[in-house]
Image (cartoon, rainbow, N blue to C red):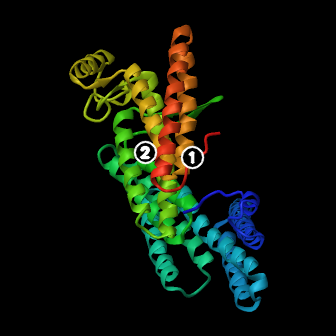
């Protein structure tokens, strides 16, 4: 379990010695520097690779330069020793990125009819070979092999997406493709132990029910046409990650926790949508849809009639009910997370509690001062009850009386 600790205060309280405090601080500093170095190195490699491809702008030149960069990198890794290993890794990866990225761009630009299939299969081959060598070791450093594995994943998923766009793939196959994207990202992120890749899995997983984002001038929009079903979907993932994280080694638990936290964020954003607009469950899945322009109805009148008929028989949750349920769940989550030392969920629940209160202040209760009176007075006994419950739990666990400040 990772925990935040004030080493100065722990030394003052006699919990740890000054030497132990220095060792803890040294390890924390090393971890942060390593993370910073890796971010800078990855960003530099990515920028240089893209820059070379577009600067040379010729397939043959990109291929020759990429091969030369790989050869130079492998030579540095073989002869340069530990001091210059970073340069060897960078050169090898820039070369590999030029070959893979340059070939992918050339296929999309000049051979569009076969690009999707070629990239899908080619990416799968790179994934298989790089993954095999990464797990078993050999050929190059794990950093290089892991990075090539990620390149292969990008090519493979990009090829599938091209095929989906080419054939205008719709539901339910499109939903299954999104689930495949999520599983592939989570699996590769776990193999290479890069939590950022694992975290990206939440994007296609949420999109399986069309939850997503959109951008237009001066606005960035989150939308969830099936907010209730999306919350159920994400809640199942949260519960699964929590259950597995408590039973798996720390290496696995780190990935499960980051996926769990992003699922929690996405679920709360879906709840925010529901608290503003309510939800007609299933309207966009087994109902008439949410957009006439892309539906099978010939006229707006036909679409509107079908939508009205569906809503009359469908299960609906009003915005007001959504708001109350969301607030109740957030309160329970704050209490549960505090007791279980789930700092991420605790902070997330408090954050969305503030967002919920702020939103409802202007959307629902802006001209109802009595609502603030009731809400404010209700919060006082609630806080007292939480404080007393925490004290009772601390005494039952043998940790002594809880702090009453």
Q: Is residue 44 left or right of residue 121?
A: right
> Looking at the picture, how far across and down is residue 138, in whole percent?
55, 88
C-beta proximity under 8 Å, tags 1 and 2: no
Q: Which residue is the site of mark 2?
A: 206
SS for tag 1?
A: loop
- In the image, 362 versus 127, the foreground residue is 362
Q: Is residue 325 visible?
A: yes
**Is residue 264 visible to the viewer in this orientation of the structure?**
no
Tell me the CA gap for discs 1 and 2: 40 Å
* Vertical relation: 361 (above or below) 203: above
Q: Position of residue 301 (x, y in %)?
A: 30, 15
Q: Is residue 361 above or below residue 286?
A: above
The percent coordinates of residue 252 (x first, y second) are 47, 67
Query: Which residue is drawn at the image coordinates 40% and 19% (left, top)?
Result: 320
> 171 or 274: which is nearer to us?
274
The C terminus is located in which quarter? top right
Q: Give the labeled residue for mark 1.
A: 402
């Amino acid at each position: 379990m990772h925990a935040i600790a004030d080493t100065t205060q722990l030394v003052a309280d006699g919990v740890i010695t000054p030497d132990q405090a220095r060792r803890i601080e040294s390890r924390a500093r090393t971890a942060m520097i390593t993370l910073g170095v890796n971010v800078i190195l990855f960003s530099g490699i990515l920028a240089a690779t893209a820059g070379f491809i577009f600067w040379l702008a010729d397939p043959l030149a990109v291929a020759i330069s990429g091969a030369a960069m790989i050869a130079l990198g492998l030579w540095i890794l073989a002869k340069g020793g530990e001091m210059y290993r970073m340069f060897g890794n960078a050169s090898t990866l820039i070369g590999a990125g030029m070959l893979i990225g340059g070939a992918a761009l050339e296929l999309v630009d000049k051979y569009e009819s076969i690009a999707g299939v070629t990239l899908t299969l080619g990416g799968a081959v790179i994934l298989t070979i790089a993954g095999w060598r990464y797990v078993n070791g050999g050929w190059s450093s794990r950093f290089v092999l892991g990075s090539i594995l990620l390149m292969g994943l990008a090519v493979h998923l990009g090829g599938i997406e091209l095929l989906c766009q080419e054939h205008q793939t719709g539901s339910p196959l499109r939903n299954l493709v999104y689930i495949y994207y999520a599983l592939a990202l989570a699996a590769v992120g776990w193999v290479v132990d890069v939590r950022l890749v694992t975290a990206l899995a939440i994007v296609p997983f949420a999109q399986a029910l069309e939850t997503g984002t959109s951008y237009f001038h001066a606005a960035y929009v989150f939308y969830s046409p099936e907010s209730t079903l999306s919350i159920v979907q994400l809640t199942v993932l949260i519960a699964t990650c929590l259950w597995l994280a408590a039973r798996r080694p720390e290496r696995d638990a780190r990935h499960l926790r980051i996926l769990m936290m992003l699922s929690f964020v996405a679920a709360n954003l879906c709840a925010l949508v529901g608290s503003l607009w309510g939800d007609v469950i299933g309207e966009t899945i087994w109902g008439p849809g949410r957009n006439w322009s892309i539906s099978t109805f010939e006229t707006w009148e036909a679409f509107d009639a079908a939508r009205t008929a569906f809503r009359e028989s469908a299960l609906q949750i009003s915005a007001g009910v959504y708001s109350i349920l969301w607030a109740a769940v957030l309160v329970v989550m704050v209490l549960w997370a505090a007791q279980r030392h789930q700092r991420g969920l605790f902070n997330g629940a408090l954050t969305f509690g503030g967002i919920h209160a702020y939103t409802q202040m202007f959307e629902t209760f802006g001209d109802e001062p009595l609502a603030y009176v009731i809400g404010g007075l209700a919060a006082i006994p609630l806080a007292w009850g939480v404080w007393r419950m925490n004290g009772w739990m601390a005494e039952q666990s043998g940790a002594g009386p809880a702090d009453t400040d």
